[in-house]
Image (cartoon, rainbow, N blue to C red):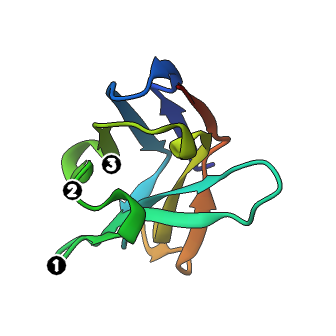
Amino acid sequence: QVQLVESGGGLVQAGGSLRLSCAASGSIFSIGAMGWYRQAPGKQRELVASIPSGGTTKYAESVKGRFTVSRDNAKNTVYLQMNGLKPEDTAVYYCNAESLRTYNNRHSLSAPDDYWGQGTQVTVSS
């Protein structure tokens, strides 16, 4: 059973910083891209940042230069360092793991699948 557990959300004043973490657990063989999405009230969920297992990171235009995504493959963990936070960054932030494969048994792997965390609230006050 794969679980993605997020931590690090909270309340911060405008201009402040937060660091989100998301650890994937279970009998994990490999993970493709890992990333962060967010959803503000009344809005659609949007990509914030993603990082592939190897390659170039991707950021939403609104967070470029302020947010940094990183990952520790040995720990199956992805991080989001958020600096210069603005009230418009207020949202529930969700961790995503793409193309995750698990060990079925000693001889086979699961098909790739996508997993989501439960979400963590980030609130930025003005």
Q: For the view shown, which residue lies furthest in the left direction?
A: 55
Which residue is pictured at 21% across the width and 56% down the height? 65
* Amino acid tagged 2: Gly
Pick whichever, 38 or 118, lies toward us. 38
Determine the secondary structure under disc 3: loop
Q: Secondary structure at mark 1?
A: loop
The answer, for residue 45, to whether it is visible in the render is yes
Bin the neighbour count of mark 2 within 10 Å (Cα to Cα): few under 14, some 14-19, many 20 and up. few
Q: Residue furthest right?
A: 42
On the image, the x and y values in percent for residue 124 come to 53, 29
Instruction: Please state if 51 lies on the left or on the right of 96 as rendered.
Output: left
Q: Is residue 51 left or right of residue 104?
A: left
Q: Position of residue 1 (x, y in %)?
A: 63, 48
Q: Position of residue 122 (x, y in %)?
A: 56, 32
Sequence-first disc among 2 and 1:
1
Above or below: residue 57 compared with residue 40: below
For disc 1, the marked residue is 55
**Which numbered marker is on residue 65?**
2
In-front residue for pair 117/57: 57
Mark 2 or mark 3, which has the lower sequence index? 2
Q: Residue at x 67, y 63 (%)?
A: 45
Image vertical order of residue 5 relative to residue 125, above or below: below
Residue at image coords 28%, 62%: 64
Q: Is residue 55 rendered to the left or right of residue 16?
A: left
Q: Mark 3 packing: few (<14 Cα in 10 Å), some, or many (20+)?
A: some
Can residue 31 be seen here? The reply is: no
Report which residue position mark 3 lands on. Answer: 76
Amino acid identity at mark 3: Asn
> At label 1, which amino acid type do we have?
Gly
Up/down of 52 relative to 86, above or below: below
Percent x, y of residue 18: 36, 28
The mark closer to the camera, 2 or 1, is 2
